[in-house]
């Protein structure tokens, strides 16, 4: 399945670094799905899925012990708040980039999420229209892998 998407403002790179704005080249599995139960229905998927909580964030500070992990607010260092007003995180698929092993500084919070109108670039994630994201997650039980940065 091929879908229109937005990628990172820094393009696509095989040498992902924290804060570079690039989407990491590769094939990544979806490890879990979060959704805003107050805005959208539970996504139809075989993947682990649960409602997002308003006090959840993702640690994006290299050097922190919870780097590239889900954290609860308040949190003592800068974080990626997951409860957003703009709808971009109404559904979030966590991509396996830099999870096992998790290496400090090689990129965090790489998600599959809802795109802005016009598919403007992301900070390094992959973004789809809400409808396409819902269809992708439901496709034959849900996607096992997401590939970007390759035409094959």
Image (cartoon, grey):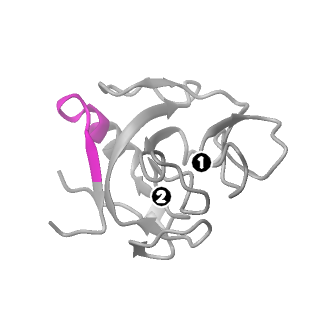
Mark earlier in primary sequence (2, 1): 1
Q: Nearer the viewer, residue 64 or 42?
A: 64
Image quarter hosting the C terminus? bottom left
Q: Position of residue 126 (x, y in %)?
A: 42, 57
Q: Position of residue 104 (x, y in %)?
A: 61, 57
**In the drawing, what numbered circle is on residue 111?**
none
Pointer 1: residues within 10 angstroms few (<14), some, or many (20+)?
A: many
- Vertical comparison of 52 with 131: above or below: above
Question: Residue 70's quadrant in the figure?
Answer: top right
For image coordinates 50% across by 63% down, the residue present is 124
Q: Position of residue 99 (x, y in %)?
A: 48, 46
Q: Nearer the viewer, residue 102 or 142?
A: 102
For image coordinates 40% across by 36% down, the residue present is 31
Lateral position of residue 119 relative to residue 139, left or right? right
For image coordinates 38% across by 71% down, the residue present is 14
**In the drawing, what numbered circle is on residue 68?**
1
Lateral position of residue 151 relative to residue 44, left or right? left
Instruction: Say if mark 2 contacts mark 1, CB within 8 Å.
Output: no
Q: Secondary structure at mark 1?
A: loop
Q: Which residues are magenta?
A: 135-146
State which mark lies toward you, 2 or 1. Answer: 1
Q: Position of residue 100 (x, y in %)?
A: 45, 45
Q: Badge 2 is on which residue?
A: 125
Decide whether residue 9 is among the magenta residues.
no
Q: Nearer the viewer, residue 105 or 152?
A: 105
């Amino acid at each position: 399945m091929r879908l229109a998407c937005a990628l990172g403002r820094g393009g696509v790179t095989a040498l992902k670094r924290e804060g570079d704005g690039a989407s990491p080249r590769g094939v990544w599995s979806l490890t879990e799905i979060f959704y805003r139960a107050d805005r959208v229905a539970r996504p139809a998927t075989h993947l682990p899925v649960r409602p997002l909580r308003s006090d959840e964030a993702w640690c994006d500070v290299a050097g922190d012990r919870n780097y590239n992990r889900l954290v609860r607010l308040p949190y003592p260092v800068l974080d990626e708040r997951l409860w957003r007003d703009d709808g971009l995180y109404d559904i979030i698929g966590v991509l396996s980039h830099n999870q096992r092993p998790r290496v400090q500084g090689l990129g965090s919070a790489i998600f599959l999420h809802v795109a802005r109108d016009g598919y403007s670039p992301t900070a390094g994630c992959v973004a789809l229209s809400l409808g396409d994201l819902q269809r992708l997650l439901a496709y034959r039980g849900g996607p096992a892998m997401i590939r970007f940065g390759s035409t094959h």
